[in-house]
Image (cartoon, rainbow, N blue to C red):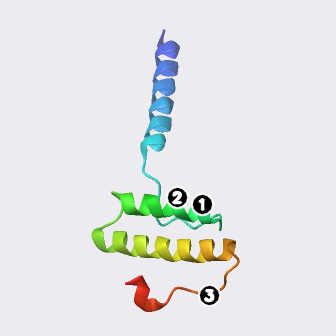
Amino acid sequence: MKNTIKFASVVVSCLCAFEATATMPVNPNRPYTETTCQYAKERLKEAVVGSPLLNSKEQRQTVQDAIRQVERACLEEAGRTDTTPETQRK
């Protein structure tokens, strides 16, 4: 009986640990693993939605970084190497 209770408590704690990791928000500052335009757009959407892991200043910086990544990746996919002028980024 004691072994059954111990086993059940181990199983429950493991299930809780797996569920906790599944509900954690993604790290918005994780590195860009792909360089496609579509991936960059998805990351921009994530950045705009926001994350509870970032304060407002970090949130703005993450969105700006994501915008630059979209510009770079989408221009590369289009076969262009020019960049958006700095005055248009503000």
Distance, label 3 to label 1, CA atoms, is 19 Å
Residue nearest the viewer, comparing 76 with 32: 76
Residue at 31 percent across and 74 percent down: it is: 57
Q: Amino acid at mark 3?
A: Asp
Q: Amino acid at mark 1?
A: Gln
Q: Residues within 10 Å of mark 3 (few under 14, many from 20)?
A: few
Residue assigned mark 1: 38
Q: Nearer the viewer, mark 3 or mark 2?
A: 3
Q: Which mark is residue 82?
A: 3
Distance, label 3 to label 2, CA atoms, is 23 Å
Q: Which sits earlier in the primary sequence, circle 3 or circle 2?
A: 2
Residue assigned mark 2: 42
Q: Is residue 17 above or below residue 41?
A: above
For this view, does 33 lie left or right of residue 42?
A: right
Residue 78: % across, % down: 67, 73
Q: Amino acid at mark 2?
A: Glu
Residue 63: % across, % down: 41, 70
Residue nearest the viewer, comparing 45 with 77: 77
